[in-house]
Image (cartoon, rainbow, N blue to C red):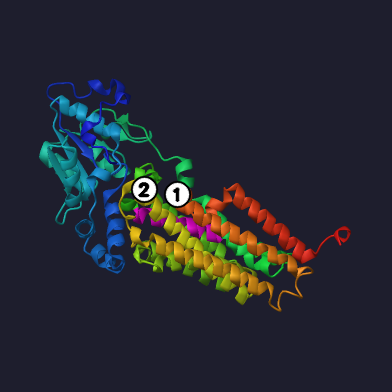
């Protein structure tokens, strides 16, 4: 969030809550941080930011956990740098706090996150008189937070704004309980006064579907490539297993996308377009994203158990590679595009593993050069758009603007090499016995040359704003090329009707 929240105007949605705290002797207002003041969780954000900065930390986390949650939070807070000006603040909560401050009410930030993370937020907003947060050996959650606030303000001597089940322990010792988020059943006796529900907001199914990136599943159609390349159109068992592989790969890919978005939170908030993603904008909490990623990966593993064992190895390799890419490899120049290209090719190999078909040399060679070009055009478009939007190099990447022409040169070379491999395949001995009219396949070469050349021109014109395969799925010219290619393939396989001869 780039706008300074000190300038947020009064939120009219607060409505009749203007009267709350109007009495002269009102208790101090204690405000939780995670999920209340901000629509995120700073402890989880510090975990992802720390892993993003140093992927080897994943091996040291168990030792921090063994020392206790307070030590874990301290270790993560020390290793992470979170900009408070970019956090997704709950504007309604900030407006309510400002309203109470105008009435000279004392306001305290009460956070289970570490003090190193909470204090910069308090300083940035300038709305708090004090900060109570995890520090030293004390993890201020639930009962510990209740004890700290009671020790400072007395039993029933404070109001508390919270949102999770653990806050019930604090509400029971508070004078007034405020509940942020969707309405839920809360015992009316948790505080001296009945609980007040404020600022209703909850995740939507649309946001959940968006972070799963179902539209990216179109890439998984590559799983069926080996069946088509081997003309296994009547292999019902192979197509059934490939269908299960498609579903498993989709769920696994969605899990990887979720983890990638969580790891990239800080960088996404600096991007003109990505900052509107559900996690970066705060529409979805990172806790939900982490739980959903684990669930999707578990379901994918269950589906893989019904397929040949080699498919499970390919799926595991895909997930580990994408995780390594998100944690480390995406910041390595050229390594990132080679990894992206390999992830495309792994889909082809996964289809072969599921259907128990050995992929040909020609298919793998063609895939390597084609997908390397697509990976480079994706990176080129991203870097080119970033230059126009922000004037700075792409955040979280290893490239700068001087690399644009090199990427274009290498990507175009890979594209033309892929077409050359296709041409050599058409002229190979393996084609003649397979197709009735193999000469027709030559028409695929100009079609592919046109499509790849057009992609690069669109990228240079800033008109390629997504993964090239996903872009092609929504581009009528690309769909036309696919339709013509399919027609060429059918003519080559079945030959021309008799009346055309």
Nearest the viewer among 472 and 86 is 472
Give the magenta part as a residue range.
247-264
Other residues around mark 2 within 10 Å, as few (<14) / some (14–19) / many (≥20): few
Q: Is residue 430 left or right of residue 281?
A: right
- Asked if 171 appears above or below 480 in the picture, the reply is above
The residue labelled by disc 1 is: 462
Q: In which quarter of the image is residue 347?
A: bottom right
Nearest the viewer among 121 and 24 is 121
Quick one: quadrant of the N terminus?
top left
Q: Counting residues from the N terminus, which is met first, the one under dot 1 or under dot 2?
A: 2
Residue sitting farthest toward the right: 499
- Dot 1 and dot 2 residues touching (CB under 8 Å): yes
Residue 242 screen position, x and y as percent: 63, 63
- Our reading of the magenta stretch's main secondary structure is helix
Q: From where the camera sits, is residue 37 visible?
A: yes
Q: Is mark 2 on a helix, strand or loop?
A: helix
Q: Gap in Å between the C-alphas at discs 1 and 2?
A: 9 Å
Numbered label tally = 2
Residue 468 screen position, x and y as percent: 51, 55
Residue 154 screen position, x and y as percent: 12, 36
The residue labelled by disc 2 is: 388
Identify the residue at image location x=22%, y=54%: 81
Identify the residue at image location x=22%, y=37%: 31
Q: In which quarter of the image is residue 46?
A: bottom left
- Residue 499 part of the magenta segment: no
Quick one: quadrant of the C terminus?
bottom right
Q: Is mark 1 on a helix, strand or loop?
A: loop
Q: In this view, does 481 lie to the left or right of 181?
A: right
Residue 335 screen position, x and y as percent: 40, 69
Nearest the viewer among 146 and 48 is 48
Nearest the viewer among 162 and 233 is 233
Q: From where the camera sits, is residue 247 visible?
A: no
């Amino acid at each position: 969030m780039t706008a300074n929240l000190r300038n947020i105007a009064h939120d009219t949605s607060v409505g009749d809550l203007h009267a709350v705290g109007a009495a002269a002797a009102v208790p101090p207002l204690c405000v939780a941080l995670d999920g209340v003041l901000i629509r995120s969780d700073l402890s989880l954000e510090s975990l992802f930011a720390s892993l993003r900065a140093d992927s080897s930390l994943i091996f040291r986390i168990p030792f921090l956990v063994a020392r206790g949650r307070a030590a874990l939070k301290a270790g993560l807070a020390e290793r992470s740098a979170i900009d408070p000006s970019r956090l997704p603040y709950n504007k309604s909560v900030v407006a309510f706090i400002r309203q109470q401050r105008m009435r000279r009410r004392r306001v305290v930030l009460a956070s289970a996150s570490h003090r190193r993370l909470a204090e910069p937020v308090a300083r940035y907003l300038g709305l708090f008189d004090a900060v109570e947060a995890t520090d030293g050996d004390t993890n201020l959650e639930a009962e510990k937070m209740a004890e700290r606030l009671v020790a400072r303000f007395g039993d029933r001597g404070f109001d508390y704004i919270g949102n999770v089940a653990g806050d019930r322990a604090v509400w029971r010792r508070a004078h007034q309980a405020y509940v942020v988020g969707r309405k839920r059943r809360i015992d009316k006796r948790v505080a001296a006064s009945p609980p007040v529900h404020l600022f209703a907001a909850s995740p939507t199914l649309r946001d959940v579907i968006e972070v799963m990136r179902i539209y990216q599943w179109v890439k998984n159609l590559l799983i069926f490539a080996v069946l088509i390349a081997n003309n296994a159109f009547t292999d019902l068992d192979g197509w059934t297993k490939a269908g299960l592989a498609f579903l498993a790969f989709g769920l696994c890919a969605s899990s990887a996308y979720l983890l990638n978005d969580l790891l990239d939170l800080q960088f996404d908030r600096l991007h003109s377009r990505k900052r509107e993603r559900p996690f970066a904008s705060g529409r979805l909490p990172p806790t939900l994203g982490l739980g959903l990623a684990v669930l999707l990966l578990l379901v994918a593993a269950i589906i893989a158990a019904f397929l040949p064992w080699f498919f499970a190895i390919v799926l595991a390799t895909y997930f580990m590679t994408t995780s390594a890419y998100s944690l480390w490899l995406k910041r390595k120049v050229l390594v990132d595009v080679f990894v992206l290209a390999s992830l495309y090719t792994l889909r082809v190999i996964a289809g072969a593993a599921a259907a128990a078909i050995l992929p040909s040399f020609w298919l793998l060679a063609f895939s390597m050069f084609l997908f390397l070009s697509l990976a480079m055009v994706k990176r080129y478009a991203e870097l080119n758009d970033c230059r126009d939007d922000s004037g700075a190099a792409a955040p979280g990447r290893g490239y700068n603007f001087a690399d644009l022409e090199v990427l274009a040169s290498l990507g175009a070379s890979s594209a033309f090499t892929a077409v050359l491999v296709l041409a050599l395949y058409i002229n190979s001995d393996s084609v003649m016995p397979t197709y009735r009219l193999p000469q027709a396949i030559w028409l695929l070469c100009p079609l592919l040359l046109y499509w790849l050349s057009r992609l690069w021109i669109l990228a240079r014109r800033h008109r390629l704003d997504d993964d090239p395969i996903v872009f092609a799925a929504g581009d009528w010219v690309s769909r036309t090329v696919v339709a013509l290619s399919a027609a060429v393939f059918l003519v080559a396989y079945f030959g021309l009707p008799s009346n055309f001869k």
